[in-house]
Amino acid sequence: MSAPVTATSPTPTALDVAAERARTPGCATGHHFNAAGAALLATDTVEAVIGHLRAESLHGGYEAAKLAAEDLTAVYARTATLLGVQADEIALVESATAGWQRVVAALRLRPGDRVLAARSSYVSSALHLLAAERETGVRVEVLPSGPDGATDLEALERALRAGPAALVTAAHVPTSSGLVEPAAGIGALAGAHGVPFLLDATQSLGQLPVDMAALGCDLLIGTGRKFLRAPRGTGLLAVRRPLLETLAPQAPDVRGARWTAERSWELHPDARRFELWEAAHALRLGLGSALDDLHALGPGTVYTHLAALAAALRERLGALPGVRVTDPPAAGSAIVTFVVDGLDASEVQRQLARRRVHLVAVPADHGRWDMDPRGLTQVVRASMHVYTDDGDLDALVEAVAEIANGARGTGPTAPAPVSAAAPVVSPAPGPAGRPAVRRHDAVVVGLGVHGSAALRQLAERGLDVLGLDQFAVGHDLGSSHGATRMIRRAYPHPDWDGLVDTAYRAWAELEEASKTRLVDVTGGLYAAPGVRPDPLRGPGCREVGPEEAARIFPGLRLPEGFTAVHDPAAGIIDARATLRAQLALAERAGARIADRTPVTGWRPDGDGVVVRTADSEVRARRLVLCAGPWTSYQVPSLASHLTVTRIVNAYFAADPRGPLGRGGLGSFSVDLPEGLLYGFPAADGRGLKAGLDSGPAWDPGAARPAATEDELALLASAVARVLPGAGPVTESLTCLYTMTADRRFLVGEVPGVPQALVASACSGHGFKFGPAIGAALADLVCGLPRPDLGFLSPARPAPGGAR
């Protein structure tokens, strides 16, 4: 038997809501009021689960469990601390219902046994009792509620005096209201009459203090997914001694019993007799992480914060015309229930979801004993947690007011959309005639390959996201226009390997999602002088000499002394189709696009940002800057690290059936004294495409004239040296490269402004990472760590290393 554990907590202190939001990625996806259903997980909890799954993939399930044995054992101790019991009185189960069914079965209720159940009982518990009544003759007596909505303790005492009872049960907090049952009073009466008291703490653990001894509770069930903020699929069962020694599971499992002889077995001496051998260890470690978080905050601190939030919400909702709060007078939990006159609760839920306010509607068949006597067929349930802030409350109250007004015929019932592919219009005037500020979860500035990828990813994750571009969608003034781009695995440093691999997977996923072929694998040769400080290498790549290079690409002739790296996975990206696909998928997922809308400035504002355009302001929780050559305009602090360069590309006459077509050439680059010459075979009917990545520094705001004769002559001379048979220039185009000193990107938080992210995935090789960078930005917006991007941090010192 383990030593007793006492349920202690520090003196309540003020809760740092901003810190809790920062470690809760789901806060970026809307206003979440469903902690009573499944609360948002903290980043540490997610990492605990993922970390163990990785260990299982590397070592095997049994081996990973052994490695995590100490941490798994600690979950029992942390649960015991929370409940004020001993660790060996705790069983970890798959859900609260699983715990309920096992422990009630262990009571071996017989015909005629009386079960006294509070009206707060949860549907699954009530159904179990009613089934036992029908099938075995157990007598289920539903206790009346008092005027305050809580269990009438005098009625309970009369029932206990009326004759022997086998069980008293109540839900500490029901699913259908913010009621808090007088659990200590119920426990005291049950204990005085020697009757076991089973408390369903499913809705109270994590928001209310729950000490089993203080509550007089013999049996307790709970779940991890609600206010404990643990993953779904976790639950707990606590059985206090001496009752524990008298209970045996109806169906022993190898986890809880030892098979001692052919027809005999021994139960485990503690509460683990109720467990099953097969368990999701990763989820249990997630439960442990969540319990650690609660312990660090202090249950008293959490309770004080949530009680204040709920009281404020009840008051504000109760003041709205057409809205009725349905919580009974004994309400005091973090659950608030209400109805809107003239609207079904499910319809209210749907309309709130369209406004990114997430909660649930509870039907009467989830709480018949509670809701039927109160004449309720359905209620809207809002439940908050430590990550709920004033902005969330404002969003919920304002949305309910708008919906209620619409139901009464005095206002709109749905938010007006921003029209796609059109300038942002001025919102309706606010106080004193000032324009009201539009609110979004995120705003993406710049809709080139990285901005459109981020827009799509954010929209598909459920965020209310707005994309802004100063020019018309599909313009040719930046760095993402044109027909083709290169993709390759060959890079000079292993730092890139992970991101390259992610990019290839991201392109495959984008092709599948868009049903469009975007990548044409041609293989690639990348040539340079035989002696260089930073040779290319990479997964699947190998160095080849001039003779083998000539066999691979007959159309390419290497200068004397050059070698090449062959990358068989290299190829050509359809740039135009990529932009179209990403923007179409973003809009399909609900993103709003406003092109021809220059951003004139932005500023941090509390935990969000305010973005200014010519005629409006937009407020967002996060800002994503993918401004390409204009990055320095939006983030002046990065100007010293970025140089914008004007680059010339041209098409040269070539027979697509000859050595410069697909049969004799793939994607290529040759590091010449004039600069890095790169290009693609004649495959699209326009001839051989080539360019040099060197050019003059350029102000992106200045006019950009067509390529000059001198620029085209320099490019043609370089092409003639390594691509015999190329004809004259047939057309040309210019674009802007945004270069860093080490040719590595800048991707991450704007230095000193965590509410804003910047992606300058640039230096002439960023397009190939478009979908992967978009996903990375979405991860960062949602608070998911991306340590793999550390080598691209905008906060790194002014670089000067190898490419």
Image (cartoon, helix red, strand yellow):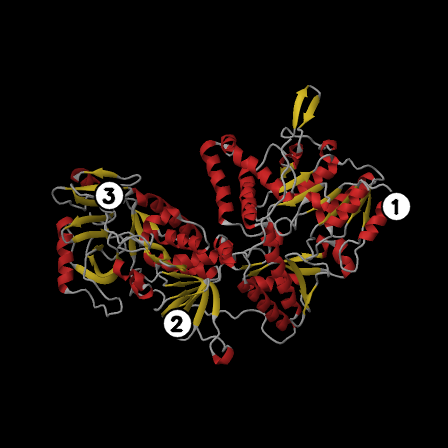
Q: Amino acid at mark 3?
A: Leu
Specify the label residue 162 is tagged with: 1
Count the marks. Answer: 3
Assign the N terminus to one quadrant of the image.
top right
Q: Residue at x 69, y 19 (%)?
A: 262
Give the residue number, with chain letter if any, for mark 2: 613
Nearest the viewer among 607 and 380 is: 607
Q: Residue furthest right?
A: 162
Residue 395 appears left or right of 252? left
Name the front one of labels 1 and 2.
Answer: 1
Determine whether label 1 and label 2 are within 8 Å by CB.
no
Q: Amino acid at mark 2?
A: Thr
Give the residue number, with chain letter if any, for mark 3: 536
In three-dimensional space, the C-alpha distance between marks 1 and 2, rounded to whole angstroms, equals: 74 Å
SS at badge 3: loop
Name the front one of labels 3 and 2.
Answer: 2
Determine whether label 3 and label 2 are within 8 Å by CB.
no
Q: Where does the image place residue 453, in percent across and percent down from the top left?
A: 39, 57
| Label 3 vs 1, first from the N-terminus | 1
SS at badge 2: strand
Q: Where does the image place residue 54, in percent across and percent down from the top left?
A: 46, 38
Nearest the viewer among 95 and 72 is: 72
